[in-house]
Image (cartoon, helix red, strand yellow):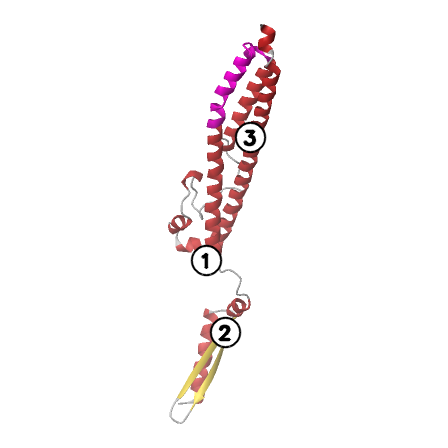
Amino acid sequence: MDFGLLLGHARSIAQGIDRALPGCVLGCRVRWTHEAAGVHCTGRCVGDEQSAMTPDVPIEDERLEFLRHAIALSEWNIRTLDTKAQISIVGFVLSLNPLWSILTSTCPRAASSMVVAILLMLFVATVLLLAFVFIVPVTSMRPKATGGWPKKGLFSAGDPNLVAAGLPADRIGSPTSEVELAAETLDLAHVREIKSRRFKHALRSVFVFYAWSVATFLMLRNCGAAAG
């Protein structure tokens, strides 16, 4: 076999690899014996060297999986805050009945008292603050994007693996999808922070209401004796 023919064959292989895999280096070695001749080629890519040098850097699939679980966790936290606010409203409204019975038994004219009127105003304000947690929507930090992650309600979040299974493979694996998932994660974190802040303000209002209830009882406890 002609040595020049083998060398030309090795050169054509190297050019084809360079076009197909840019950034990769191909080294070929011609083996020539009396019985046979052949070409042995080995390749090395820049990405392989970077992966070997930085083994702790997560790959793209791992980053996408992390973002999917982060989205599901954020939605679960938001649902938890909404549920806490709804349960708090029910318990808070039911607590008014025994409290009102105590005040009216302490002072028959409690309904016409100014301190009781302030107490009722605090009650209405606290209920509104608790309802504000889950009724008023939080404004998004970014414009709504088209495509990418499916837009679902916060009350229908499920297993992130099942949600991601309905997406096209090219949509999940594209860099644009990774950016969209990261933006969605930040957006949900913003919603969670706002709702958590609202719930804390509502809890402070509950504390103020019960503190004023104790003060109202202390101010009205001699009302019955004065009336008598």
- Pinpoint residue 174: horizontal percent, then vertical percent: 46, 55
Q: Give the alpha-carbon distance from disc 2 to disc 1, as whole Å.
A: 23 Å
The residue where tag 2 is placed is 44
Callout 2 touching callout 1 (CB < 8 Å): no
In the image, which disc is placed on residue 61?
1
Circle 3 crowding by C-alpha within 10 Å: few under 14, some 14–19, many from 20:
many
Could you tell me which residue is drawn at 42 percent across and 45 percent down? 150
Could you tell me which residue is drawn at 42 percent across and 89 percent down? 2
Quarter assignment of residue 65: bottom left
170 magenta-colored: no
- Pinpoint residue 74: horizontal percent, then vertical percent: 49, 44
Q: Earlier in the sequence, mark 2 or mark 1?
A: 2
Kind of residue sitting beneath label 1: Asp
Q: Quadrant of the N terminus?
A: bottom left
Which numbered disc, 2 or 1, marks the residue closer to the eye? Answer: 1
SS for tag 2? strand
- Pinpoint residue 35: horizontal percent, then vertical percent: 38, 93
Say if 112 sits above or below 130 in the image.
above
SS for tag 1? helix
Q: Earlier in the sequence, mark 2 or mark 3?
A: 2
In the image, which disc is placed on residue 202?
3
Say if 126 sits above or below 21 in the image.
above
- Pinpoint residue 130: horizontal percent, then vertical percent: 52, 29
Magenta part of the chain: 90-113
Q: Earlier in the sequence, mark 3 or mark 1?
A: 1
Callout 3 touching callout 1 (CB < 8 Å): no
